[in-house]
Amino acid sequence: VRFLERKHDRFVFHLSTRDRTRLAEVLKRFPLLPAGYAARPQPNPGKTTAEARGSDHGLLEAALTDEKRASQKAVQRLLKESSAWRATGDGFRLELTSAQVEWLLQVLNEVRVGSWRLLGCPDPERNPSVALTETNAGHCWAMELCGHFECCLLSALDASA
Amino acid sequence: MVDMAAPASAPDVETVPESATDEKSALDPGYLVICWDDPVNLMDYVTHVFQIVFGWPKPKAEHHMLQVHHQGKSVLAREGLERAEHYVHQLQKYSLHATLERES
């Protein structure tokens, strides 16, 4: 993925055919995180935290679930509709608004964190090796690929700041 | 045990309407927005999220990102309940591990 330019509020990227296929493959995995994941408690519970406020916590979780549902539809639109994509000789031009870039970052990171969770939440500093199997290799691939796409989007935002 | 069918002559106690109490607690600054470390979120990504959610300049966002990375957590804001909940919600939308804590 290559950032080409920023035209007002639109970011223009170049993707090879393989890039586009890979992006579609990881986006199709969305959503991966269970509904209650975002609301998991703090590592060292003690003081009053959000989860103690049961009703508000439920509302927050419901709001996140609704937003994910809307994002899932937006992912399908991005993959199916051609308005954002334009074929070039050696791949595709993808044009995204700044709001779509933010949204895509959220979606990619959801898949990244979800894949990491499915890998058993490995911590490279404590236990660097993850035994790859036929089952979990796809999660590892998706996690790394999402990280790569996130870096491309972040570089584009940084370059155009 | 309290008898719910109490006599009509209730003690003369000044009561505060529930909505007023809720409003007070919602406006009372004393809720901490905390972001916790995890080994999956990219450092540049976390910095970016802090910039977007809090409108911080990059150096401040990086400072808090590094605090999360090295100390395991960072207190990002101290706000009233509603505002603090809003921030936690925004951070969770980006799949960061954020919680709300009542300041002691």
Image: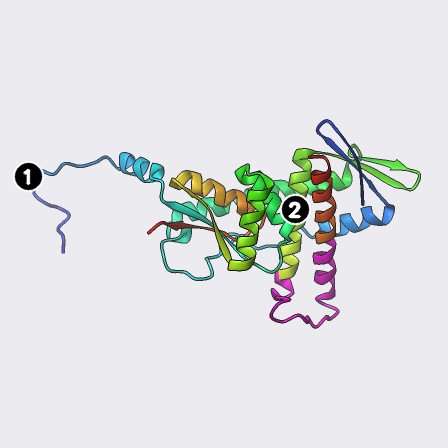
The percent position of residue A38, horizontal first and vertical second, equals 53, 52
Check disc 1 and report the residue beneath it: B9
Asked whether residue B45 appears in the rendered view, the answer is yes
Can you say which quadrant of the picture contains the N terminus of chain B? bottom left
- Closest to the observer: A44 or A35? A44
The residue under label 2 is A107
Camera-side residue: A97 or B19? A97
Badge 1 sits on which subunit? B
User: Is residue A23 shown in magenta?
Assistant: no
Left or right of A68: which side holds B74? Answer: left
Snapshot quadrant of residue A13: top right
Q: Amino acid at mark 1?
A: Ser
Q: Nearer the viewer, residue A130 or B51?
A: B51
Q: Nearer the viewer, mark 2 or mark 1?
A: 2
- Measuring 68% from the left and 36% from the top, which residue is drawn there? A100
Q: Classify residue A19 as left or right of residue A75.
A: right
Q: Give the residue at x 55% y 43%.
A: B60
Residue under the point 63% across and 42% down: A71
Q: Which residues are magenta?
A: A117-145
Whether residue A37 is visible:
no
Residue at far top of view? A8
Residue A129 belongs to the span the image colors magenta: yes
Q: Secondary structure at mark 1?
A: loop
> What kind of secondary structure does the magenta stretch mostly adopt?
loop
Which residue is painted at 65% across and 40% down in the image? Answer: A103
Depicted A110 relative to depicted B23: above or below: below
Q: Are marks 2 and 1 on the same chain?
A: no
- Whole-percent x, y for residue A161 in the image: 68, 35
Q: Secondary structure at mark 2?
A: helix
- Who is closer to the viewer here, A137 or A124? A124
